Amino acid sequence: MIEPGPDSLPRASDAKTVENALNVLGSRQKKNLLARLLPFLGPAFIASVAYVDPGNFATNIQGGAQFGYLLLWVIVASNLMAMLIQTLSAKLGLVTRSNLAEHCREHFPKPVVIGMWVVMEIVAMSTDLAEFLGAALGFQLLMGVPLFVGALLTGLATVLILGLERFGFRPLEAVISAMVGLIALCYLLETTIVRPDPLQVLHAIFVPRFAGSESVFLACGILGATVMPHAIFLHSALMQGRIVVRDPARLKSLYRFEIADVVIAMGIASCVNAAMLMMAATTFYQTGHTSVATIEEAYRTLEPLMGSAARWIFGLSLLVSGLSSSTVGTSAGQVIMQGFLSMHIPIWIRRLVTMAPPLAVIAWGLDPTRTLVVSQVVLSFGLPFAVIPLVMFTSRSDIMGEMVNRRSTTVAAGLIAAIIVVLNVYLIYKTVAG
C-alpha cells in the first residue's frame, strides 16, 4: 500500500503531482514514457543548476582559452561522478526521509557536526559568491549597469524566485527547469555558431592528460564547479518528503524514476559544460586569443570574432545561470543550517547575509573571474565532507534497509572520493612548490 506522508500533499499543485506519481507507480498500464516520467522530474533539475552556474563559466572559459580542448575529459568524468553522487543523495532522502545534514547530526559526535557545519558554511559562501557575482556580471554586460547595482538586482530577483516556494515545490521546479532549458538552448546556439572540430573533441574526451600545474588547478576548479557539495546536501532534502512510498517494491520503482531524473538533468548539464569549454577553445585558443581569462573579456571578444548574436547569447546564458543558481544556493544554505544545527532563519535574512562577500569583492575591486575560479577550488576542497558521509550512510543496511548500496556502487563512490582527495593534495603540492 502507498500512503502519502503529511508533507507530501501541502498544496494543490503538489497534490496533483504526487497523485500522478502514485498512479504511475500503482498502474501496470503502458503509458507514454514522457507522461510516466513527468511527475518524477524536477528535483535533479534543481540540483543540476549548481552544475551550470557562473563558476562553470569562469573555469570553462579559462580552461578552453588556455588549453583548448585539453580538459574536456575532466568535464565528462566530473559529470559521470556527479550522476552517481546525486543518485545516492536522492536515494538517501527518498528512503530515509531525512537529508544528508540531518544524518550527519544524528550519527556523528557533536564536535564533528559543528566542524562539518563550519566547513559547509564556507562552501556555501563560496557558492553564493560565484553565483552572485555571475548574475551581477550578467546584468552589467547586458544592461550596462554598474556591477554593484547588478548585485542588488540579483539579490532582489533571488528573493522573488524563492517566493514561489509558498505555492509548493512544483512551481519552483518548473521555473528552475525552464531556466536550465534556456541555458542549454543558449549553448546549443553557441555551439552551432562556433562549430568545434569533432575529431579534436573526441580525442580530448577519451585521452586524459594535463599540461602543467595551472591545468591541474583549473581541473580542480572544474571538478569543484561540477560535483558541488551544496547540491549533494540539497538533493537529499528535495527528495525526503516529495513522494512518500512505503511498499518496498514500489519504492524501488520510484528510485528508478529518480535515476532517470538524475541522468536527464545531469546529462543536460554535462552537455552545457562541454559546450562552454568548446566555445572558448574554438573561439579563443584556436585563434590565438589565449590571454582571454575573464568573463568580461570573453563577452567583449565574442562580437568581433563571431558576431553580436554570440555575444548576446553568452550574456543571457550567464545572467540566467547566475539567477537560477543563486536561488538554489540560498535554498541549499538553509538545508545545511537546518540539518546540522536544527536552526532556521528567514530566507530573506540569509539572502542579505550571503550578499556581503560578493559586495565586498566588488567594493575591493578584485577580479571577478579569478575570484570565481578560486571559489570553485574551495568547493572542490569541501567535496570530501559531503561525498564521504554520503557513501558511508548509503552503504549502511541499518539506515537504508533493502535499498543499501551494492558493493560495486560503494567501491565506485569510494573511488570518486579518493580521486577528489588526491587531486586536492596534488593541487596544494604544486601550488606550494610553484
Image: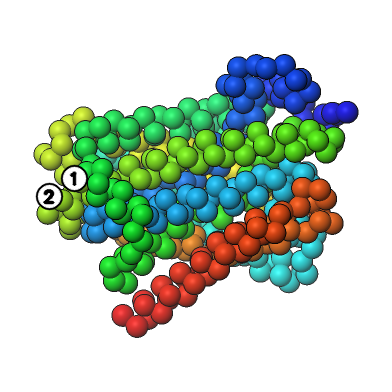
- Mark 1 → mark 2, Cα distance in angstroms: 6 Å
Q: What's the residue at 45%, 54% (across, down)?
A: 77
- Say how the picture is coloured: rainbow
Does the residue at mark 1 contact the one at mark 2 (Cβ under 8 Å)? yes
Nearer to the camera, 266 or 203: 203
**Horizontal arrangement in the rendering, residue 387 relative to residue 209 (left or right):** right
Q: Nearer the viewer, residue 415 or 144?
A: 415
Residue at the (36%, 61%) spot, across then down = 208
In front of the other: 341 or 281: 281
Q: Position of residue 33 (x, y in %)?
A: 59, 22
Query: Which image quadrant for residue 12?
Result: top right
Determine whether, in the image, residue 293 is placed left or right of residue 207: left
Quarter of the N terminus within the rendering = top right
Give the residue number, with chain letter if any, for mark 2.
Answer: 287
Is 331 drawn above or below residue 225 in the view shown? above
Q: Secondary structure at mark 1?
A: helix
Q: Is residue 8 above or below residue 209?
A: above
Instruction: Residue 305: give x, y in percent of width and height.
Output: 13, 40
The residue depicted at 77 percent of the width and 37 percent of the height is 251
153 sits to left or right of 243: left
Residue occupying image coordinates x 50% and y 50%: 80
Residue 197, above or below 117: above
Examine the rendering and report whether any part of residue 84 can be seen.
Answer: yes
Residue 421 position in % (x across, y down): 52, 70
Which three-letter amino acid code belongs to the residue tagged 1? Answer: Thr
The three-letter amino acid code for the residue at tag 2 is Thr
Between 431 and 352, the one nearer to me in the picture? 431
Q: Residue furthest right?
A: 1
Determine which residue is flagged by label 1: 283
